[in-house]
Image: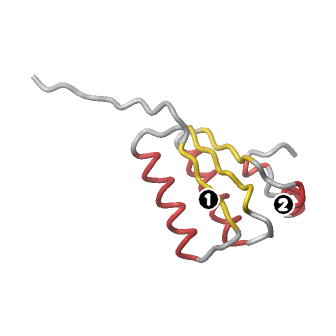
Amino acid sequence: MATAAHLAVTHPARFEITTVSSMEAGRDLRNRVRQALQHGVRDFVFDCQRWDRLDLLVLSSLVQCAAACREHGANFDVANMSSTMLKDVRELRLAERLGLAA
């Protein structure tokens, strides 16, 4: 008789977002989020404390990660975003896509 095992992931996956970016780093972040989603992770925290200047590659990757989380019914939380970065994200009208209060 076969039995199915289900791994319940109870802690959030945490990712540190920094200003240093590249196309490869953005692709790696998106791949890591997709892999975590496939393994049942449903809570994600993106710590932006070290993200200190607007970087469109980073922002694009975050928006894509947020979309992937929504598609899978996962929680996507942005933590420690500076007021300057939050202002920039709002001016670009992307706050809602990142789940940030308007």
Callout 2: few (<14), some (14-19), or many (20+) C-alpha neighbours within 10 Å?
some
4 or 58: nearer the viewer: 58
Question: For this view, does 28 lie left or right of residue 80?
Answer: left
Which residue position is annotated with label 2?
Answer: 85
Residue lying at 71% horizontally and 69% vertically, measured from the top left: 19
Camera-side residue of 84 and 101: 84
Q: Where is residue 68 in the image (x, y as percent from the top left)?
A: 56, 51
Badge 1 or badge 2: first in the primary sequence: 1
Pointer 1 residue? 64
Q: Position of residue 35 (x, y in %)?
A: 42, 52
For residue 53, side relative to residue 66 (left or right): right
Badge 1, how many Cα within 10 Å: few under 14, some, many 20+? some
Residue type, numbered disc 2 = Met
Which residue does the image show at 27% across and 29% down from the upper left?
5
Is label 2 in a helix, a strand or a loop? helix
Instruction: Classify residue 45 as left or right of residue 81.
Output: left
- In the rendered view, tell whether residue 29 sits above or below residue 70: below
102 up-or-down from 18: above or below: above
Height in image: 72 above or below 4? below
The type of residue carrying mark 1 is Gln
Task: Give how far across and how far down residue 56 sits, in percent.
Answer: 73, 72
Give the image quarter of residue 70. top right
Please give the name of the residue rendered at 90% of the width and 62% of the height, measured from the top-left corner. Answer: 91
Give the secondary structure at mark 1: helix
